[in-house]
Image (cartoon, rainbow, N blue to C red):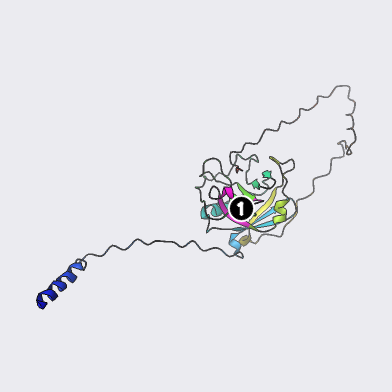
Amino acid sequence: MRFFARLFAFVACLAALPAVGQKAAPATPVTTERAPVPQTTDKENLWLLDLSDGGRVTIWLRPDLAPKMVERIKILTRQHFYDGLLFHRVIDGFMAQGGDPKGDGTGGSSLPNLAAEFNYYPHVRGAVSAARADDENSANSQFFIVLQPRLALDKKYTVFGRVLDGMPYVDAIERGEPPANPTRILRAYIAADNPPAYVAAPPPPPPSLGAPVTLPGAAPLPPPATGKTAARPKPAAVAAPKKAASTKQ
């Protein structure tokens, strides 16, 4: 009996082995690790914005959160796309939005829109996020900097960075939708490209010698007499800004 019991156990062990010439299918690996977080000293992931309100803003880019949006920011910055663009929609206590070459919230770069990269990072003060239209996959070049926490935006917009230095210059961005005297990005850089030090915007040119000068509170000077009545120029119409790529409160 013991002999047959041992024989039966041996046969069972053989049946449990894989067939000769066949390999067991490997188990599907389960990846739970996130991409490494870049150091705050990693110049390849520091975005520098020189603003017309007097200083430089340093933004820590997070490719571990939104690799496609960070790549887009680097490409456009190195193409000088952001140089001269204004912050066209700035809401006190909420956010400052820029990155639109049209300056009205409806523009973007010539590159295709990006798929959403919603992540765990919250929309706290100083967070930098991608603006988009109603389509979640419509982020392109526009971005906004959060002035005060707005956690209702979490996992609805793609956070891709945070301000490390220069937040007072962000706070000083001119408010308005659109602002009457908008703050501009004079120049944008990636720190790894060894940019020059901040250079303030040149002062506005003085009025020409032939143009009449009106002091504050004084009535404008009459035009010189020419024997003909000069036609008055029509006031410029200001269209309400479209918010096709804006954030929503």
Looking at the picture, how far across and down is residue 60, in whole percent? Answer: 61, 59
Tell whether 40 sits left or right of 169: left
On screen, 229 above or below 244?
Answer: above
Q: Nearer the viewer, residue 122 or 58?
A: 122
Q: Is 10 above or below relative to 43?
A: below
Residue 198 image offset from top left, x and y in percent: 72, 57
Front residue of 155/80: it is: 155
Q: Amino acid at mark 1?
A: Val
Q: Is 150 within the magenta?
A: yes
Give the magenta-colored segment's residue range: 146-162
The C terminus sits in image quarter: top right
User: In front: 12, or 223?
Assistant: 12
| The N terminus - image quarter | bottom left
Return the residue at label 1: 128
- Residue 229 in view here: yes
Q: Is residue 17 above or below residue 178?
A: below
Whole-percent x, y for residue 197 in the image = 71, 60
Left or right: 102 as drawn, with respect to 27: right
Query: Which residue is situated farthest in the top direction here?
Result: 228
Residue 32 x, y percent position in the rendering: 44, 61
Mark 1 secondary-structure assignment: strand
Inspect the magenta stretch and tell me whether residue 189 lies in it.
no
Residue ID at (64%, 51%): 146
Residue 51 in sight:
no
